[in-house]
Image (tube, coloured by chain):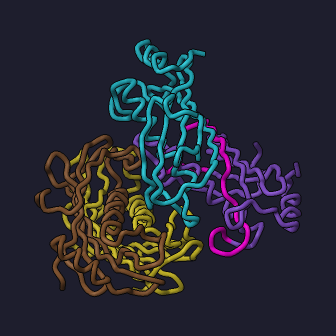
Chain colours: A yellow, B brown, C cyan, D purple
Amino acid sequence: MNAGEWTILRPHVVRWIECDLYAHVNHAAYLTLFEDLRIEHWKKLSGRLPGLHPGPSPVVASIEARYLREVGFGDEVMLGCRTTSFRRSSYVHEYALWKAGELCFSARCVCVVTEGGAKAALPPELRAKLVAEGAKEE
Amino acid sequence: MNAGEWTILRPHVVRWIECDLYAHVNHAAYLTLFEDLRIEHWKKLSGRLPGLHPGPSPVVASIEARYLREVGFGDEVMLGCRTTSFRRSSYVHEYALWKAGELCFSARCVCVVTEGGAKAALPPELRAKLVAEGAKEE
Amino acid sequence: MNAGEWTILRPHVVRWIECDLYAHVNHAAYLTLFEDLRIEHWKKLSGRLPGLHPGPSPVVASIEARYLREVGFGDEVMLGCRTTSFRRSSYVHEYALWKAGELCFSARCVCVVTEGGAKAALPPELRAKLVAEGAKEE
Amino acid sequence: MNAGEWTILRPHVVRWIECDLYAHVNHAAYLTLFEDLRIEHWKKLSGRLPGLHPGPSPVVASIEARYLREVGFGDEVMLGCRTTSFRRSSYVHEYALWKAGELCFSARCVCVVTEGGAKAALPPELRAKLVAEGAKEE
């Protein structure tokens, strides 16, 4: 995975709260880091923050995460997010975390767009933005 | 998935801290609930808590989670954990969360046994216990 | 502090997620444990969970916490909560955590009752219940 | 409190994970934000991260927090940290959070310096740095 191919890239320094007794980042703490990128992406896409305004918002339908190399307290890492594909009312995110250029964590997340508790179609202007990002319609 | 087929079953009432702006359990909070069961299982298996004593301990190598139905603050749910298979130095856990008998969340987690930062073989007595639980050697 | 004098007492086993690199309970994790008791107390008092129903709910206005002895992963502890006093629209909680009978953590929390973002008076039946608990009107 | 008088100032945008059902920052999440500043300050002071290296590290002995105004998801806030005083083996931090120039949260934290589980004296060079920051010896 090449950093140039990612829609969102953000540096991060591992926080005390993210580490556990093993002195490594806890497995659930990774997911929270990428939650931030998922929200940042949605804000760029729709102009709105989820949960605060009427209109569609994404929820996580499934996630697959691979923990490849341990990351520790104070480590300087890079976080990446990109959309690989989308359908009528969902899109697929990939997440990656690198340390010194080495991939340490990767994940694939299916986000479903909902409104009022029901699935909602991605509006045409959001679909166009996803295509412009490089995501494929499936 | 039938509750009778699970090695560990534990009731849980959804906590305030586990819920987010959507008034539902946050996607990462599910993983932390099952971390507790993974540790309880390891304690039953090895007699030891991870991270506190010398000797092998499990780490999460990968996890696949499916969010099937939303769960809210104060909901009474049931958590399940079982080992489906194992290899030389790893085993596979399945996790499930039910509300009123309906499956709301399921996950599959590959746990790698490590000692001093390197993979370690599952000791024979632990392998025997996993077989007794119903796990298959692969 | 005698355990007999506490309105709510609940045993707890320290979780992996609550511990940090020092192998002790993180200072903020204590507050989340007592958030559970504050909510349990409000449910007993009002019959309702905060945040889910119309009507008054408590929010934390201030908290003073003392970390007296370290508590570690897997430790069996006891959590206590009681109301010491109340006013028109607020009440004071005390929290305590003991390990093997020794006080390890104590806190004092001012809870303000709000409704629709504004302070709300404690209804007479809730005031009566607080008096029955042993709380003093100030 | 004037922002010019703070040793560490850091902007922050409130994260999804920090908010609860009330759509506001959870009371414990504030403490975790200031944990980051406490660690950053210790790193500046000692050149070392706590928990990773031999030598003294700070632990929280007590904290007093006042929740003055609610802060919500996506809010742009400023975080401040300063040392007001110190003794042989402890120092006092003040923390503040502002939104649009208004103070929303303030706290006072007593940090005790420990090494190997016992109180340790602040080394002379660290005392000198605290004086240079404006902290008073008590």
Asked whether residue B124 is drawn in magenta, I would say: no
Is B99 located above or below residue D114 in the figure?
above
A11 and B120: which is toward the camera: B120
- Which quadrant does the N terminus of chain A fall into? bottom left
Residue visible at 79% across and 57% down? D89
x then y, percent, for residue A63: 29, 68
Whether residue A83 is visible here, answered yes or no, is no
x then y, percent, for residue D23: 44, 42
B77 and D103: which is toward the camera: B77
Span shown in magenta? D49-77
Residue visible at 49% across and 26% down? C113
The answer to which quarter of the image holds residue D69 is top right
The answer to which quarter of the image holds residue B106 is bottom left
D135 and C126: which is toward the camera: C126
B5 and C99: which is toward the camera: C99
Is D40 located above or below residue D103 in the figure?
below
x then y, percent, for residue C94: 56, 33
